[in-house]
Image (cartoon, rainbow, N blue to C red):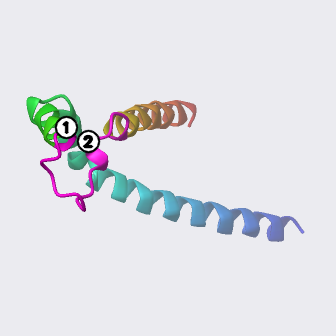
Amino acid sequence: MRIREMEQRLDKASAAVMHLSAALDEYVAAGEAIRELSEYYSSSEWKQDLADDEAGRLPHDMKRGVLSEDGIWNLLEDNKELLTRIQSVVNTL
């Protein structure tokens, strides 16, 4: 009975570690994109792109989520919360 329970725990923990490792690799790879989006969002280029969009100078079929008031900001806030959560988890291990 105990061996079966421990085996189930081993299987569950192994799957979780593998899943988190893959997700962490993906997150680390996105780090540069997050930094670039942060720089873009606080730049005069973003303000100009937004003004161009509002003036109708961009193609109507162009995807423009980066120009929304909340798109990049929400991502950056979610990223901060995730980093805080990761630090909290690391501190408890």
Give the x, y percent position of residue 85: 50, 34
State left or right for residue 33 relative to residue 81. Answer: left
Q: Which amino acid does label 2 sit on?
A: Leu
Q: Where's the C terminus, which quadrant?
A: top right
Within 10 angstroms of label 2, few (less than 14), some, or many (20 or more) residues?
A: some
Q: Is mark 1 on a helix, strand or loop?
A: helix
Total labels drawn: 2
The mark that comes first in sequence, 2 or 1, is 1
- Marks 2/1 in contact by CB < 8 Å: the verdict is yes
User: Residue 64: percent from the left, percent from the top?
Assistant: 26, 51
Q: Is residue 70 above or below residue 6?
A: above
Q: Give the range drawn in magenta.
A: 53-71
Chief secondary structure of the magenta portion: loop
- Residue 50: mark: 1
Q: What element carries label 2?
A: helix
Relative image position of residue 6 (x, y in whole percent)? 76, 64
Q: Kindly identify which residue carries mark 2.
A: 67
Based on the displayed image, in which of its 4 quarters is residue 40 positioned? top left
Residue sitting nearer the eye, 44 or 14: 44
Packing grade of label 1 (10 A; few <14, some 14-19, many >=20) is: some
Please tell me which residue lies in front, 51 or 45.
Answer: 51
Apparent side of residue 24 relative to residue 72 in the rendered image (left or right):
right
Q: In which quarter of the image is the N terminus?
A: bottom right
Q: What residue type is labelled 1?
A: Leu
Q: Position of residue 76 (x, y in %)?
A: 35, 35
